[in-house]
Amino acid sequence: MSTNTIVKTNSAKAWLLAARPKTLTGAAVPVLLGTIAAYLEATNEIRPLPIVFCFLFAFVMQIDANFVNDYFDFRKGNDNEKRLGPKRACAQGWITPAKMKRALYITTLLACIIGLPLILFGGWITILVGLICVVFCFLYTTHLSYKGMGDVLVLVFFGLVPVYGTYLLALPHPTLSFSAEPFVLALACGFVIDTLLIVNNFRDIENDIEAGKRTLAVRLGLNRTLRLYLFVGLFAIALSGIVFIAHSHYFAFALSLCYIPLHFKTFRTMKAIRKGKALNKVLGKTAANITIYGIATATGMLLDTMLG
């Protein structure tokens, strides 16, 4: 959505911009892969209702995280005229800080309400996991992003929790016994999505140094962060590829490989640009790569189920 026109404060358009709907694909891909992993194991016996709640919870938590990030970064003064990333609602005056604070509490409450029915499918441990998600949603922006913990949290909350969690809840008889394929797939998904954070932090290295944020990109510097971006994406494909081949899921392996040329192309663009707002183009392409990876891998897994 274009932001060049005047946005009325606290209007519907302002809230849509604040919710940042383009980020919802990052929430959908892990749940999609967890669903397909369960289908691969249980086929027609998977339970659709917990899958629906997992998608809803992921979407609302992503919007909540966007609101939390918007509000607290504005309060800390990080969203100033030096900001290189996409425009933020509070900083632009689209949403007043008081309204944003109220909205983030509402979305947090809504996420908790959506998560409650999952007790019926996964027991009380699902509530514990949900509460941990909510707590770290706040801790990331307010504390942990300043300590360079973002990449670890992406692996956990965009990989292990949504992929493996959805997989378990979708099964007709959830079990806590370990299953290698969905676990490794969860890690691979987390690494692929982490490339988005790496680009974001790569772009913001100079501003983050001024703000006292010790992100992994700040610690590594430009050149090593560039190499990290390339490595993480390729490592994710290698990781999932090993487990797909081990389980004779050749369609999943083959289709997941379509991510590699896209990742290389985006890496070369990132390397050529290096600094400035132009890196937002790389951010958008990386998000598109993640979506393509998710759809291609899920399609391959479905083909393995139907034709294998």
Image (tube, rainbow, N blue to C red):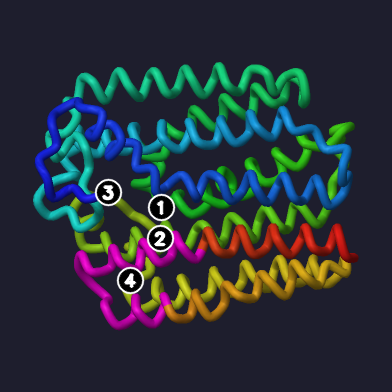
Q: Nearer the viewer, residue 242 or 107?
A: 107
Residue 148 is marked as: 1
Of callouts 4 and 1, the N-terminal one: 1
Are circles 4 and 2 on residues that touch, CB within 8 Å? no
* Marks 1/3: CA–CA distance: 31 Å
Tell me the number on the disc at residue 1. Answer: 3
Is the residue marked by circle 1 packed among few (<14), some (14-19), or many (20+) residues within 10 Å? some
3D distance between C-alphas at marks 3 and 2: 31 Å
Please say if the residues under marks 1 and 2 sit with CB atoms less than 8 Å apart: yes
Badge 2 crowding class, 10 Å Cα cut-off, few under 14, some 14 to 19, many 20 or more, is many
Q: Please state if 75 lies on the left or on the right of 31 as rendered.
A: left
**Rounded to the nearest whole Å, what is the CA distance between mark 4 and mark 2?**
8 Å
Whole-percent x, y for residue 305 in the image: 85, 58
Query: Distance of mark 3 from mark 4, alpha carbons?
Result: 32 Å
Return the mark for residue 221: 4
Compared with 108, 79 (above or below) is below
Q: CA distance from mark 1 to mark 2?
A: 5 Å
Residue type at the position of mark 3: Met
Which residue does the numbered mark 2 point to in the structure image? 216
Residue at 44% in and 80% down: 265
